[in-house]
Amino acid sequence: MPNLSGWGRFPRLDCRVIAPAEPEAARAAIVAEPSLIARGNGRAYGDAALNPVATMDMRACAGVESFDADTGWIVARAGTMLSDLIDSFLPRGWFPPVSPGTRFVTLGGMIAADVHGKNHHVAGSFGAHLAWIELALANGEVRRCSPDADAELFAATCGGMGLTGVILRAAFRMIAVETSMIRRETLRAPDLAAAMDLFEASAGWTYSVAWIDCLSGGRALGRSVLTRGEHARAADMPSRVAGPPARTRRMPFDLPGFTLNRWSVRAFNALYFRAGRPGTALVDLAPFFYPLDAILEWNRMYGRSGLFQYQCVLPLAASRAGMTALLRRIAASGAGSFLSVLKRFGDVAGPAPGLLSFPMEGYTLALDFRATAANLALAGELDAIVADHGGRLYLAKDARMAPAMLRFYPGLERFRAMRAAVDPGGRFASALSRRLGL
Ligand SMILES: Cc1cc2nc3c(=O)[nH]c(=O)nc-3n(C[C@H](O)[C@H](O)[C@H](O)COP(=O)(O)OP(=O)(O)OC[C@H]3O[C@@H](n4cnc5c(N)ncnc54)[C@H](O)[C@@H]3O)c2cc1C
């Protein structure tokens, strides 16, 4: 039996894998399994796509079924990789409306986690762009649901982490772009307050994100490099853009855990801050959206014990105080990661569509920790700060939170009721759902 994990390689479980070749086979397999969970490309960090009895690898159920070049409406199978969509549609002038920090995810995974991108403050999460999804339920019935038809099932499935059924296909609208480049502006913020002021001043930009030095303390607590960007227009382009296309590299083997220690991380963070030179540039879209994809399998850098990601969001009114408290605790610990990310979520597109959708208006912080007992204990302390400030944690990144943290999802009881209605026997289950009693 394959030994599977999420992107963090923590935890690892022996799971029987079934891999239907097309949506009808996926539907048929559901009723034959006493317990199962769908899996996309395994980019959720923790245990969301693991079920020892049956983990259904959906990647073969892929492909675009229709595309309207006048409007951008697309119908695609759930196993379709975002990277494949971008490879085929960007040269024709189309780009997904929301894109997470890696393009190696499937459409099904994007819906099940209701992913957000660097444009959340103007575009909302991915679910807000769906016209409908087709879902295979526990009894084998296939239902098409949308914000208007079977709306509660739609809301339970966007962000529902695969627990309402297996998504087979979806319809959403791509956005038109004139080039494959981004007009990027880089700004430095000497501390957290300045970084947040820059986010507020960047509300008119489509994309914004900040890398934050999680190890600097004192007056430099929260110092950041903020980048904001717009799709470059044809008129922005010089007659010829020089330079070879970006290359990807692979992490050749597991780095022993000790190479990633507080000194190497501190040195990296100091260098990164200095390297983030303020200014504007026309850059390739891939390194702007997916900087970590340039190093394939970078998760192996954390050694055999693996890593976990900590991602929380705090309500806007509590964000300054709460983020300060979190960063103080992280800086004091000396733990924390190479790339810590701060982002402003908006409410422009209305509330997130899903009952368990992660985003709310406010600030979100995401950072990686090596999966050690000390860091897991630290995460428990961070949970208390998040809870005190009315925030919540992202299920797609989680491998360790306690069930009590679920109380910060206001749609939890409605989600449970819908799940009980469509899957009374609890056929859909994952290590995450069992750990949290979802
Ligand atoms: C480097 C990196 C950067 C990231 N950046 C972001 C970011 O900026 N924003 C963000 O929101 N997320 C981000 N993520 C998280 C990632 O987008 C989500 O975890 C996404 O769900 C992964 O998709 P996947 O296809 O790999 O799904 P998996 O990891 O395989 O599964 C994730 C969940 O989706 C469910 N699922 C998958 N396919 C189906 C299906 N067909 N039907 C029903 N359920 C299904 C699984 O059961 C599981 O619960 C990032 C992850 C990485 C590794």
Image (spheres, rainbow, N blue to C red):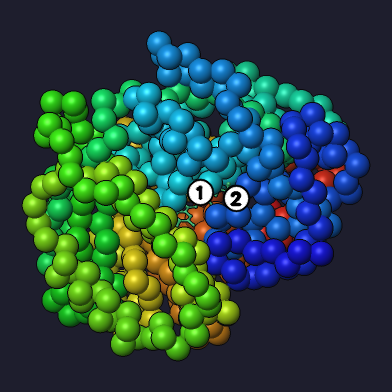
Tell me which corner region of the image, top left, top right, bottom left or bottom right, holds residue 141. top right
Residue ID at (30%, 26%): 177
Mark 2: amino acid: Asn
Tell me which corner region of the image, top left, top right, bottom left or bottom right, holds residue 336. bottom left
Residue ID at (19%, 28%): 233
Using the image, determine if residue 395 lies above or below residue 171. below
In screen coordinates, is 69 left or right of 122?
A: right
| Residue 211 % position (x, y) | 27, 61
Count of residue discs = 2
Q: Which residue is mark 1?
A: 104
Mark 1: amino acid: Phe
- Disc 1 residue: CB within 8 Å of ligand 1: yes
Label 2 neighbourhood size at 10 Å, few (<14), some (14-19), many (20+)? many
Q: Which residue is mark 2?
A: 41
* The disc label shown at residue 27, or none: none
Q: Could you say which is closer to the camera, residue 168 or residue 86?
A: 86
In screen coordinates, is 190 left or right of 126?
A: left
Q: Could you say which is closer to the camera, residue 143 or residue 266?
A: 266
Q: Could you say which is closer to the camera, residue 203 or residue 390?
A: 203
Residue ID at (31%, 47%): 245
Marks 1 and 2 sit apart, C-alpha to C-alpha, by: 7 Å
- Disc 2 residue: CB within 8 Å of ligand 1: yes
Circles 1 and 2: CB atoms closer than 8 Å: yes
| Residue 192 % position (x, y) | 20, 64
| Residue 404 % position (x, y) | 59, 63
Label 1 neighbourhood size at 10 Å, few (<14), some (14-19), many (20+)? some
